[in-house]
Structure formats: C-alpha cells, structure tokens
Image: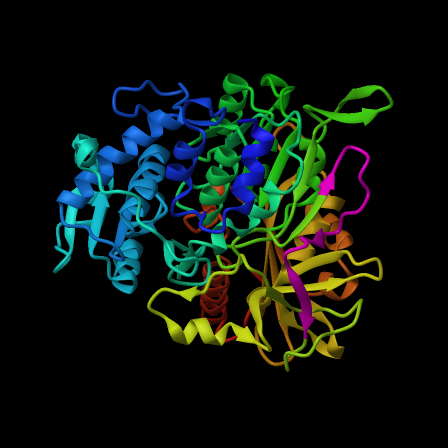
Amino acid sequence: MTLRKLRAELAADQELGVGNVLSTLVARAGDDAESGITFDSEVDGHPAWRRLTLRDLDRAVAARAAWFHCAGIRPRDPVAVHVTTAADQVLAFFALTRIGAVPALLNTNMDGTTARAYLGKVRPRALLTDAAHRARLGNEPFPGVLHTDITDAAGGYEGQAPSQYRFHPSDAAVITHSSGTTGLPKPVTASHASLFAATRHRLTLPRPRTIDRMLSALPANHAAMVIAVTLALCSGIELLMLSDQDGKGVLAAVDRWQPSCVFGFAATWPQLVAEDLDRYRLDSVQMWWNTGDAAHEAHIRKLVSVGHRVVPKRGGVDRLPGATFMDGLGSSEMGHSMFFITHTPDTDRYNRCIGKPHVFAEVAVLDERGLPLPAGRIGELGIKSPTLSPGYWNDSVTTYRTRRSGYFLTGDLVYRDEAGYYYHVDRVVDTVSLSGGRYLHTAQSEEQILAGCPEVLDCTVIAVAEDESTVATEVLVSLAAGGPAPGDLQARVRAALDEHVAATVRSVIVVADEDIPHGPTGKVRKAILRERYKERTARAAAAAGGKAETV
C-alpha cells in the first residue's frame, strides 16, 4: 500500500483516534510502514538512538498491556504515570489505551508536593512511577491506589495482552495537565476523537515532501506529544522523542540525529538561541514548529537564520538558506494550535501575530458579556473546534466556568486586523488596567523589549496594581552572552515600551534563569513573581517607617 493511499484510508476511518492509532497502523501497514519512533533511552534491550519500527513498538506495548492487565487495571480506570524518560511515557500511554484505561500523564519535572496534590484531584486507580519519582513523592501511601514501578511492566508476556479496546469517539482517552503557572495544574481530559481531529485534517493534505524526520523537544507527558506521535506514525515520518528539553541537549540531539523538523514550546527557543548556533550542525532543519505560547520575533529571527528551506520553482525546487518557523497558539484544552503562520528570513508580520485560524477552528474575540468584537478591538479568545477538550477531569465547576456563548474561553487576550490575522497580547490574568481606559499587557511589553533591546536574550514583565490608581512594573531580563554592554539598560527598556507602560516601570533587574520560577513545562510563574514583588515592597515600606520605596 502506498503512503498516499494509507493516509487517505486513515483520514476516512471514523473509528480511528488516539486510543487505537498504533494497533490500527500495525493492522493496516505492518512491516511496510515507513514510520517509527526513536528514543533517547534503551527500550527492552533495544539500544537508545536506534529506531523502533511499528512491529517493535507493538511488541513493547503488548508486553506492558499484558502486565497492566494482569495487575488488575481495567477499561476506564484512570492510571497516573509519573516517570522520567520519554520512552516510558509514550509506551505506557499506548499500553494503557490498548486496555482501554485512561492514562494521566504527569510532567517529569513536577515536584513531589505538587504531584501529590494533583493526584488528589485525578484520584487514579493506579500509579506508575520509577525510582526517582517514587522518592520524590515520599513514603506516605496512596490509599486504595495500586502503586508500582514502571520498569516491572516491560516483563509482561505479550501473548497475554488483551485485544485492542474499542473506543467510542467521545470516550476519554488521556488526561494531561495545564502548565500550572497560576496554581495547581488542572487535569485536562482529551477524548479519543478530539485529540486526533487535527491529525485527521492533516492527513487530507499533501504530506510535505521533504519533512521525513521530526525531533520532538516537547514534554513527553503533554497533549502535544500525543499529537506529534500520532501525526508522525500516520504520515510515514521518523520521530525522535527527547526526555529532556534543555536547550543544549536539544541542539546536541539536532546535531547528532539531523532532523528536518523540530517541535517545541516557546520556552525552548530562548534556550536554543542563547547558545552559539554555529557550533552545531543545524543545516538539516527545514522547520521549527512552535506550539503552546506564541513565540517572540527576536527568537524566531535567530532560528530562521540557520538551516534551509525548499521552495518550488518551474521544473523543480530551490534550496534556500534559512529555515521556516511555524508559529501558533495552543494549549492542552484547545487540543491543537488553533492558528498558524509561517516565518522565513524574509518575514515582516510580527508583533505577536499568531496568524489565521485553521479551517477546523471557529474563532471569536469576545467582550466581557461574551459578545463578538470587531476587528481592532482586544478581547478574550473564544474557540469552537472538534479538537477541544471535553473538560477538566473531576472538575465540572471549572469546565463550565470556561464556557461562554458556546465557546471555550482560552484565557488569552487577542485582536484581529482587517486582513483576518490574529495577534496575541497577553494572558487575562497577567494584564493590568491603567487609567484612561488603557491596559498594560505584559506579553506584548516583553515582545517590545526583545525587539528594541538586542542585548536582552529574554525577559519577564511583572505588573502589580499597588492601589486603585498606581501600577508598578518590574522587568526581569537575561542578557545575551558576549553581547554589547547594557549601558543604561533601564532607559533602553523604557524607550522600547509604549509611553503609558514605560511610566509604570520601577526597576529593570538582570537575573539568571534559575532566579525565575517556572512551571513544569517551562512557563514563567508570574503569579509567584508578583507575590515576591509585593513582599519586597512591604518590607521596604516597613523599613522606611511605612513609606513605600522603589525597589
């Protein structure tokens, strides 16, 4: 069967979804499949960095499914997975969905206290850990929960594996979690059909001819991982899954494995461009593919200066210097990026432009009453899409609170221009109202600083309403190694900002990455930084006899 015919059949198969994608591909393609997955750790004696075929994956998954089944895990049981390697995450996902259980994948970087609280929300039937995460969770037992080591599961006898569970499209297939930047991460449910909907759409489109090797720098617990895996397997593409998303490690993996496409989150790109890109072999890369938060122009421009792209011409193709960068905006709840825009070295549409919606997404910019706003007006992003999560696991209150006028409210503030392009300005929780009907949008301010101050590698803007009439802004910056001396950095930062925002700046502080609190997925926890600012201000006021001072 040709790959083109296989993709067409998969797109038309309405029983296909994320819960049965591997078993379906093995049945349809078997040994003829071009796709496979490479892991950076050993799998059942299979060496790290060597491709596992569909048959290899199926055998590894069957062994684990047999072991889980013999341990008493049954269809519809929620099963938490808190492990280290991408291989353990991916294979546990496939094995549990083969049984019909619902894997709840935890980020490997989640601390023990947060993980315990999160597990209390999920209430799993079983918990799968490795030695590192078992120690992190502590010795206190989880009453009524089967708690076992993930390494034991590889010893199952594949002949005892149950047959593939038959999913209904609306069945819960996996639980992932939100970033946790504003508090405890929320457990996000994805259905068998919802998390496959975008892949189904892509299977109806021509496969990019030159994208044959994808490297995933995405956290292996994330919904984006499930999408990347299903898309690669269904498209005849080799996929490398990394267990760690550290910038140097990602660049070393690109140098070693020579992918044509690299997936990542916005938090990954500043780590990459902080390094000397000339030290790595990056010419194989044709596309950097971002999801989650929108990426910054300053980081995109550096990444599209390396690699190459292939463009059609009469009678063939041209190979041009400089890769492409596909940007968008997505989240676990959205089930896929809702927008797309492709940048090249010649691109000039920035200022946090996230592009136009995918054809499967209905997008609206809504006011506080849930009514659509016209072009040019900033409002909350509302989404209708077959990719959307059906809600939060064990949390109907939050599920219904995030719905209005038939739309899912993403928590993002956006606007669209007259040409139909959308622009992201901030998260709702990070925006502060100023006098005169104006607002301070922290993400948009960060974009302006990075564009106007080339010596700044990355920055975080914290805005705090000190009272009804006063807003104070603190700007935390990391400087590019070997760059020009910052000079009067505070004056340069203020000059890059809108006048009404610059007037609120109290301090510009050079920080190291370890000084910034991050959530498990790498997002900055601005809520913690706001609290730290308030505490410092209160201490300064107390030291000054009740009079607040600039800090």
In the rendering, at what x and y percent does residue 301 appear? 72, 35
Residue extending furthest toward the right: 314
Can residue 491 be seen here? The reply is yes
Q: Is residue 73 left or right of residue 550?
A: left
In the rendering, at what x and y percent does residue 394 appear? 33, 68
- Tell which of 124 and 32 is nearer to you: 32
In the rendering, at what x and y percent does residue 541 appear? 49, 70
Q: In which quarter of the image is residue 374?
A: bottom right
Q: Quadrant of residue 199?
A: top right
- In the image, residue 383 above or below residue 62: below
Q: In this view, does 358 lie to the left or right of 257?
A: right
Colour basis: rainbow
Q: Give the range drawn in magenta.
A: 342-366
Can residue 485 be seen here? The reply is no
Name the quarter where the C terminus is drawn. Answer: bottom right
Q: Does the magenta stretch include residue 349?
A: yes
Q: Does the magenta stretch include residue 116?
A: no
**Residue shown at 45%/44% (left/top)?**
226
- Tell which of 550 and 519 is nearer to you: 519
- Tell which of 487 and 467 is nearer to you: 467
